Image: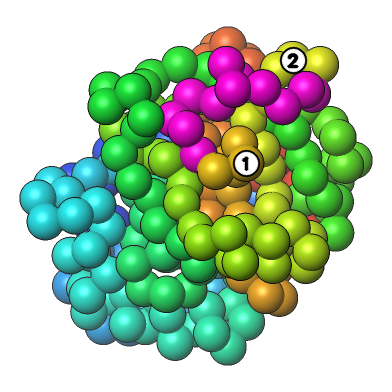
Amino acid sequence: MKAAVIVFPGSNCDRDVAVALEQASGQKPAMVWHRESDFEPVDLIVLPGGFAYGDYLRVGAMAAHSPVVREVKRRAERGVPTLGICNGFQVLTETGLLPGALMCNASLKFVCTDVNCRVETGQSLFTSAFSSGEVLRWPVAHHDGNYFASADTLDRLEAEGRIAFRYCEPDGDLTETANPNGSARNIAGVFNETKSILGLMPHPERLADPVLGGTDGARFFAALVEALA
């Protein structure tokens, strides 16, 4: 399984994702700089976390117009599996590859903590190794992770099974206190229509090795690599 990790000025989790993918697949991902207009054929594209272009205009807005993102969008629209984590999720919404937007946290503060995420569906290549209702622990680290979409869009995501993960209590209950940023309906991740694109606010790559304090992230990447093999 060959992956590409897109690197923007300000990316800060590109290496973390690359390490997690290499540990899961045994292959080093291609690290693709934002100025590139093309890159080798791959089985998976990852837009990592960070602060692309410093997020000076609006999170993900400038990155969405990078030369490499035009190619990412072209391939994603043709079905190449694409994963956006944190800032990568923001970029995916700015490009229109995913619905909704990521706004400033309800607390108006940067949030950096571990959260519990409930798997909402196992019917995707990203979640096929997990059972619906299973709870995973991953870190979050963001200032603009408050997922927003219109009521009609949220209802459609619900009806089409396109909500991937929700913030929850350790027992899986959905509560306001378990929601670190005020996201609508506790949403932590969403799919596109075909579930070939996933936007995810938490960072599974930050808990992908026992030395980091947990392995739920490693499970996520190992399952994804197996699904793509």
Judging by the rendered image, the residue that carries numbered circle 1 is 185
Work out whether residue 158 can be spotted: yes
Q: Main secondary structure of the magenta part?
A: loop
User: Where does the image place residue 159, in percent across and percent down from the top left?
Assistant: 79, 64
Compared across the picture, whether 4 is left or right of 143 comes to: right
Question: Residue 165 colored magenta?
Answer: no
Task: First in sequence, mark 1 or 2: give its number.
Answer: 2
The residue positioned 62% from the left and 41% from the top of the image is: 185
Coloring applied to the structure? rainbow
**Secondary structure beneath label 2:** loop
Marker count (numbered): 2
Observer-nearest of 69 and 169: 169
User: Where does the image place residue 201, in percent across and percent down from the top left?
Assistant: 49, 41
The part of the chain drawn in magenta is 172-183
Which residue type does callout 2 highlight? Pro
Classify residue 187 by image quadrant.
top right
Judging by the rendered image, the residue that carries numbered circle 2 is 170
Observer-nearest of 72 and 116: 116
Q: Residue furthest front?
A: 151
Work out whether residue 52 can be spotted: no
Observer-nearest of 9 and 191: 191
Which residue type does callout 1 highlight? Arg
The residue positioned 77% from the left and 50% from the top of the image is: 127
Question: Residue 178 colored magenta?
Answer: yes
Classify residue 71 by image quadrant.
bottom left
Task: Give the quadrant of the N terminus.
Answer: bottom right
